[in-house]
Image (cartoon, rainbow, N blue to C red):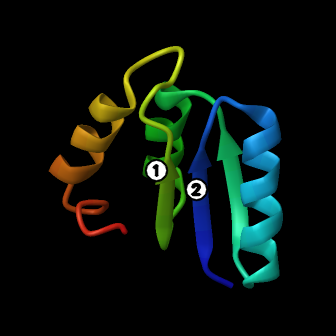
Amino acid sequence: SPRLLVVEDDTGFAQLLNDLANQYGFTCYRTGSGAEALDMLTKVQFNAVILDLLLTDISGWQVLQAIRTQPATAKLP
C-alpha cells in the first residue's frame, strides 16, 4: 500500500489524519518532530507527505525546503 508521512505535533489532529489515510488505503507514519521526519525520509520511501508548518522543534518550512532539495524526495506531493 502507498505510504504517507504525517508530520504534525497536535496528536489529536495527527490521529484524525492517520484514520483518514487508513480509510483510503495508505499506511501512515506519524511524527511530531521535523528532525525525525527528515530522518524518516532517508529510511522509508513515501508516496506523499502531510506537513505542519508550525512545528515545535524546527520550522515546517525548513523541513519542506529540505524535502525539495533532495532528489529522492523533491517530487513528493
In the rendering, at what x and y percent does residue 42 appear? 43, 49
Q: What residue lies at 51% left-to-right and 39% top-to-bottom? A: 37
Q: What residue lies at 46% left-to-right and 50% top-to-bottom? A: 41
Label 1 secondary element: helix
Taking the image as shown, residue 69 lies to the left or right of residue 6, namely left
Give the residue type at disc 2: Leu
Which image quarter holds the C terminus?
Answer: bottom left
Q: What residue lies at 31% left-to-right and 60% top-to-bottom? A: 73
User: Residue 17's image quarter?
Assistant: bottom right
User: Residue 31's image quarter?
Assistant: top right
Quickly name the residue at label 2: 5
Query: How far separated are the C-alphas under marks 1 and 2?
Result: 8 Å
Which image quarter holds the N terminus?
Answer: bottom right
Taking the image as shown, residue 33 lies to the left or right of residue 1, namely left
Label 2 secondary element: strand
Relative to 39, residue 68 above or below: below
Q: Are marks 1 and 2 in contact (CB under 8 Å)?
A: yes
Q: Tag 2 or tag 1, which sits nearer the N-term?
A: 2
Relative to 47, residue 16 above or below: above
